[in-house]
């Protein structure tokens, strides 16, 4: 009996020593990181304010200084590629319909004249942009820039005489930045700022006279998108 007890104790001690010398290595579980890659579609809305200077080369002392502002909204779609080190590149297009407009009397020598009233309104706007970002799991910080377009309607009213109008497509560039967060595997929300410079263009709201319209704007928008 004594010999059996020593045998059992020796075997138990050898088992404990073997396990202590070669402990089991715990399995590490890799953290789950949100994948921003893939396509998406969304809707956005916000507020925009701009500057629209109208000048007349043959009448250097005459001008119309407008500040169109109002609601901006529309749809957007794009595709992201998630690179190493959580960097992201992508491409995005958007189209919007807004109510950014303003009106003012023509200024001659800095004095407003009631004989001519001018108004400009952004009817349709759009952009095709690249995106560059950094993903901190479900939160994305990004910068964006590219081509911008807008259909701007310019109207001149001479009370009791006539109303003339021009609708022209302006093209230029846009740049901005924003933050986007994924609330689920498929739904994201964003807040971004964008600046647009659509340059100068000849418009025909005043027939037989060269009229140059220069337009730029700032937009702040929120958006909700579905990620595929």
Image (cartoon, rainbow, N blue to C red):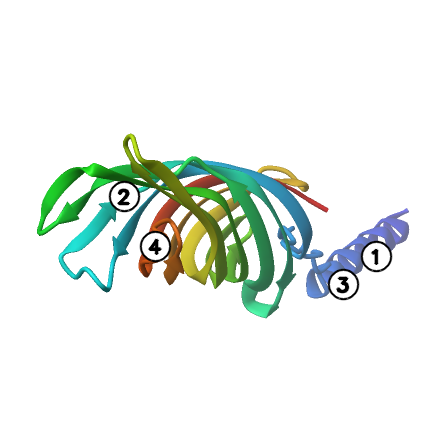
Q: Secondary structure at mark 3?
A: helix
Give the CA separation, mark 3 to mark 4: 80 Å
Instruction: Looking at the picture, tell me which residue is in the foreground, 5 or 98.
Output: 98
Instruction: Looking at the picture, tell me which residue is in the foreground, 33 or 77.
Output: 77
Instruction: Looking at the picture, tell me which residue is in the foreground, 216 or 190.
Output: 216
> Which is closer to the viewer, label 3 or label 4?
4
Residue that badge 3 annotates: 18
Quadrant of the image occupied by residue 20: bottom right
Q: Residue furthest top?
A: 160
Q: What residue is shown at x 56% (from left), y 47% (from top)?
A: 95
Residue 11's label in the rendered image is 1
Q: Secondary structure at mark 4?
A: strand
Give the CA separation, mark 1 to mark 4: 89 Å
Mark 3 or mark 2, earlier in chain: 3
Crowd around label 2: few <14 · some 14–19 · many ≥20 (10 Å): many
Q: Are marks 3 and 4 in contact (CB under 8 Å)?
A: no
Give the CA separation, mark 3 to mark 1: 11 Å
Residue that badge 2 annotates: 67
Q: Are marks 2 and 4 in contact (CB under 8 Å)?
A: no
């Amino acid at each position: 009996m004594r010999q059996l007890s020593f045998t059992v104790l020796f075997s138990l001690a050898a088992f404990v020593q073997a396990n202590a010398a070669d402990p089991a290595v715990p399995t590490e579980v890799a953290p789950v990181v949100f994948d921003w890659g893939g396509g998406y579609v969304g809707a956005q809305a916000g507020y925009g304010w701009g500057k629209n200077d109208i000048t007349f080369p043959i009448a250097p002392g005459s001008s119309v200084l407008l500040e169109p502002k109002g609601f901006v909204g529309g749809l957007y779609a794009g595709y992201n590629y998630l690179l190493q080190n959580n960097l992201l590149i992508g491409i995005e297009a958007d189209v919007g319909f807004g109510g950014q407009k303003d009106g003012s009397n023509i200024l001659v020598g800095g004095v407003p004249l009631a004989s001519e009233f001018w108004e400009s309104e952004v009817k349709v706007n759009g952009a095709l942009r690249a995106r560059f970002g950094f993903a901190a799991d479900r939160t994305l910080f990004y910068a964006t820039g590219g081509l911008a377009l807008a259909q701007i309607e310019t109207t001149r009213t001479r009370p009791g005489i006539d109303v003339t109008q021009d609708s022209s497509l302006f093209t230029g560039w846009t740049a901005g930045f924003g933050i986007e967060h994924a609330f689920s595997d498929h739904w994201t929300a964003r807040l971004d700022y964008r600046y647009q410079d659509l340059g100068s263009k000849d418009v025909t709201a005043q027939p037989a006279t060269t009229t140059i319209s220069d337009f730029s704007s700032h937009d702040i928008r929120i958006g909700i998108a579905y990620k595929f």
